[in-house]
Image (cartoon, rainbow, N blue to C red):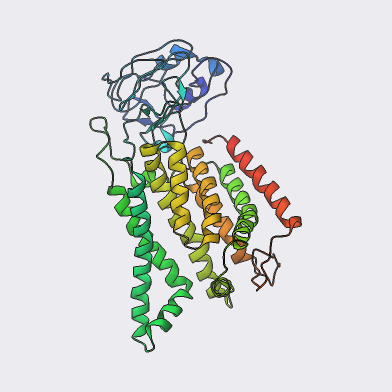
């Protein structure tokens, strides 16, 4: 029936050949359905006295049925089984491949992590003997040959979304935000004045801007979740993917969040310098730059809360939920990892409208997308994005002058090398450490 509770974790639940580490606890330690231990551990080698085929006999049982699932490492393979014990998979080339990959693998080529956060999803980090790309959703991915792999999960992957469908969702988000601002401006006209004056007031009101993005992007996300080319295959009786997991709102290691904040703070300077470099080649809109700077300059605590809420909380959250939470996994399923990453970053850049913001948004989008794929969670992306947005908000020129970042003048300013080079070093170090952080705690 499996090993539950403390004994399961003490035994290690480690599979595969070669050196490894003791597995980490992923579930809650409670039994699921009264029959098996919740969650599984992953690693390699002989930690905890459990290895290969023996591991699977000692407790990788899940759900409300008696069936054993998966296959042992170290050269032993086993038929894959559903959570209710019925066979579903086919073996082949070191693992089970195709739309329902529930099976085992040979030679330690398949690594499994189950029961994350008390949920039912299983996530495989190897598929068909090839390393799968991380971050493609609960229990699914693509192997090195681009073959879709469902790694022992009863939870469906999100439907693929082609690039023009994703572009339509992004356009809908922008149009929805504009529509909310239009309604707000029309409401202000009732107090008197022209539409142009009312629209200007809305554009200078962080509460109106935050509400517009919240509603506009929220509608686009809801519509985008319904798009796709059909429902992916699911195990019989398996639950639908919850919206939180669908959008990547999954737990992330605390160390990853701290490093993401550090990287975001440091990245503001090189990203600003990318925009400054683009301004060397394209005309500047000084009026717009001054308007943005005036919007960020707060005169009271209430205004400060409104600005922080709009630009440090709402904007990063909604943009990450749309571009990295919703669109990126679907684009990856439709076009593969490299193309999906580039297309999602390009769409993120295009909604920023002007050449300089588009340039640094493209660079930021690539970093944020890689972070989403690394941890399968959008939370580190939100943390990095919020930290980047926070710098010009929380560091006004009256507190610290950062030419090229928070200072607007008729002369084009660049970030001084004395600031830029250390910022690049800190951001690079933080991102390098992020790549080494385990994706579970």
Q: Could you tell whether 31 is left or right of 416 in the image?
A: left
Viewer-side residue, 167 vs 214: 167
Identity of the residue drawn at 44% across and 59% down? 351
Quadrant housing the C terminus: top right
Viewer-side residue, 167 vs 435: 167
The total number of labels drawn is: 0
Q: Which residue is at the far front?
A: 281
Could you say where residue 10 lies in the image, as x and y percent from the top left?
Answer: 52, 23
Could you say where residue 37 lies in the image, as x and y percent from the top left?
Answer: 39, 26
Identity of the residue drawn at 64% across and 57% down? 273
Q: Which residue is at the far top?
A: 75
Seen in the picture, residue 179 relative to 169 is either above or below; the reply is below
Viewer-side residue, 385 vs 293: 293
Identity of the residue drawn at 40% across and 12% down? 77
Q: Which residue is at the far bottom?
A: 192
Seen in the picture, residue 32 relative to 13 is either above or below; the reply is below
Identity of the residue drawn at 54% across and 41% down? 253
Could you say where residue 60 lies in the image, as x and y percent from the top left?
Answer: 40, 21
Seen in the picture, residue 65 relative to 331 is either above or below; the reply is above
Q: Could you tell whether 288 is left or right of 146 in the image?
A: right
Which of the 4 image quadrants contains residue 80? top left
Seen in the picture, residue 434 relative to 307 is either above or below; the reply is above
Could you say where residue 196 lies in the image, as x and y percent from the top left?
Answer: 41, 82
Viewer-side residue, 82 vs 382: 382
Quadrant housing the N terminus: top left
């Amino acid at each position: 029936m499996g090993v539950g509770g403390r004994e399961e974790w003490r035994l290690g639940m480690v599979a595969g050949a070669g050196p490894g580490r003791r597995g980490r606890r992923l579930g809650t330690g409670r039994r699921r359905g009264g029959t098996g231990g919740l969650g599984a551990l992953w690693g390699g080698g002989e930690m905890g006295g459990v290895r290969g085929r023996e591991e699977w006999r000692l407790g990788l049982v899940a759900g409300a049925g008696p069936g054993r699932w998966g296959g042992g490492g170290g050269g032993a393979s086993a038929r894959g089984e559903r959570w209710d014990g019925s066979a579903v998979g086919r073996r082949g080339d070191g693992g089970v491949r195709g739309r329902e990959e529930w099976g085992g693998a040979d030679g330690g080529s398949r690594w499994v992590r189950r029961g994350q956060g008390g949920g039912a999803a299983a996530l495989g980090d190897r598929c068909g003997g090839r390393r799968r790309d991380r971050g493609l959703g609960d229990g699914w991915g693509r192997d090195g040959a681009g073959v879709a792999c469902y790694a022992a999960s009863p939870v469906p992957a999100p439907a693929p979304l082609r690039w023009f469908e994703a572009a339509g969702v992004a356009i809908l988000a922008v149009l929805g935000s504009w529509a909310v601002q239009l309604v707000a401006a029309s409401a202000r006209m009732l107090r008197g004045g022209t539409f142009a004056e009312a629209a200007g007031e809305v554009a200078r009101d962080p509460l109106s801007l935050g509400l517009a993005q919240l509603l506009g992007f929220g509608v686009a996300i809801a519509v985008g979740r319904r798009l796709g080319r059909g429902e992916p295959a699911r195990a019989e009786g398996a639950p639908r993917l919850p919206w939180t997991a669908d959008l990547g709102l999954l737990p992330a290691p605390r160390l990853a969040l701290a490093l993401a904040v550090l990287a975001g703070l440091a990245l503001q300077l090189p990203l600003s310098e990318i925009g400054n470099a683009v301004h060397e080649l394209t005309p500047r809109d000084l009026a717009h730059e001054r308007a943005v700077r005036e919007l960020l300059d707060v005169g009271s605590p209430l205004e400060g809360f409104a600005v922080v809420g709009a630009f440090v909380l709402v904007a990063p959250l909604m943009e990450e939920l749309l571009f990295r939470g919703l669109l990126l996994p679907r684009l990856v399923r439709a076009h593969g990892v490299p193309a999906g990453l580039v297309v999602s970053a390009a769409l993120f850049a295009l909604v920023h409208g002007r050449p300089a913001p588009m340039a640094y948004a493209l660079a930021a989008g690539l970093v944020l997308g890689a972070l989403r794929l690394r941890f399968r969670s959008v939370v580190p992306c939100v943390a990095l994005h919020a930290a980047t947005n926070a710098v010009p908000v929380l560091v006004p020129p009256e507190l610290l002058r950062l030419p090229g970042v928070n200072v607007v003048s008729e002369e084009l300013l660049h970030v001084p090398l004395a600031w830029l080079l250390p910022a690049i070093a800190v951001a690079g170090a933080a991102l390098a450490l992020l790549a080494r952080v385990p994706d579970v705690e």
